[in-house]
Image: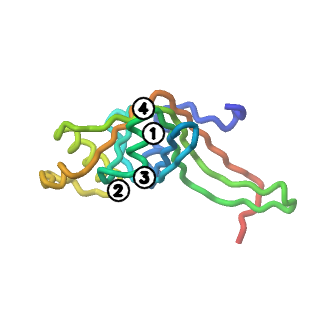
Amino acid sequence: MRRKDREVRDREEILSILEKADVCRLAMCDNNIPYIVTLNFGLKEGGNSLYFHCAGVGKKLDILRKNNLVCFQADIEHEFFLHTIACGCSMRYKSVVGLGRIHFVHEVSEKIEGLRAITNHYTDMKSSGFIDELVDKTTILRLDIEEIAGKSLVMPGHMRQE
């Protein structure tokens, strides 16, 4: 990272950013053509993987079957800061960027683990069960994180845009 003063090094803080994010962007490459999607997600206990759910067909899955190396990104706490000089404007935020590999989850017990992680990410509901028929139809993807970095930018002294 070029701006070391903005780097988030603490793993717990990086995981906290992921826990607070409402979406994760997943970037893939199809024959040197980039493709990015925004997904709901859940963080696997321990923070080494992310889970996603989706339909069983589509461009994203076609790409991932050919190339499972992905980049992911999530961000929180966006706030625009207006400065008296146009080039002095900025944005406050916290973000996470990482690399990893996507794996298609087939085992029912891990599919349920993934669905629970996603449910827990967005709600306080503690689901005790999932309908087998729906679990069977749902595609669950697990992203095993290989690299991860955090960044935080706070712009003190700037005026917030009203």
Label 3 crowd (10 A; few <14 / some 14-19 / many >=20): some
Q: Give, as a three-letter code, the residue at label 2.
A: Tyr
Residue shown at the point (40%, 44%) measured from the top left: 62
Q: Give, as a three-letter code, the residue at label 3.
A: Leu
Q: Are marks 3 and 4 in contact (CB under 8 Å)?
A: no
Residue situated furthest bottom in the rendering: 162
Label 2 crowd (10 A; few <14 / some 14-19 / many >=20): some
Residue under pointer 1: 15
36 to the left or right of 129: right
Question: In terms of image quadrants, where is residue 78?
Answer: bottom right
Q: Give, as a three-letter code, the residue at label 4.
A: Arg
Compare marks 1 and 4 and give the one earlier in the sequence: 1
Assign a secondary structure to mark 2.
Answer: helix
| Pick the front one: 106 or 43 | 106
Q: Give, as a three-letter code, the residue at label 1.
A: Leu
Label 1, label 4: how far apart the Cα atoms are:
18 Å
| Whole-percent x, y for residue 152 in the image | 62, 43
Quadrant for the N terminus, please. top right
Residue under pointer 2: 122
Residue shown at the point (82%, 54%) measured from the top left: 88
Assign a secondary structure to mark 4.
Answer: strand
Residue under pointer 3: 39
Label 3, label 1: how far apart the Cα atoms are:
17 Å
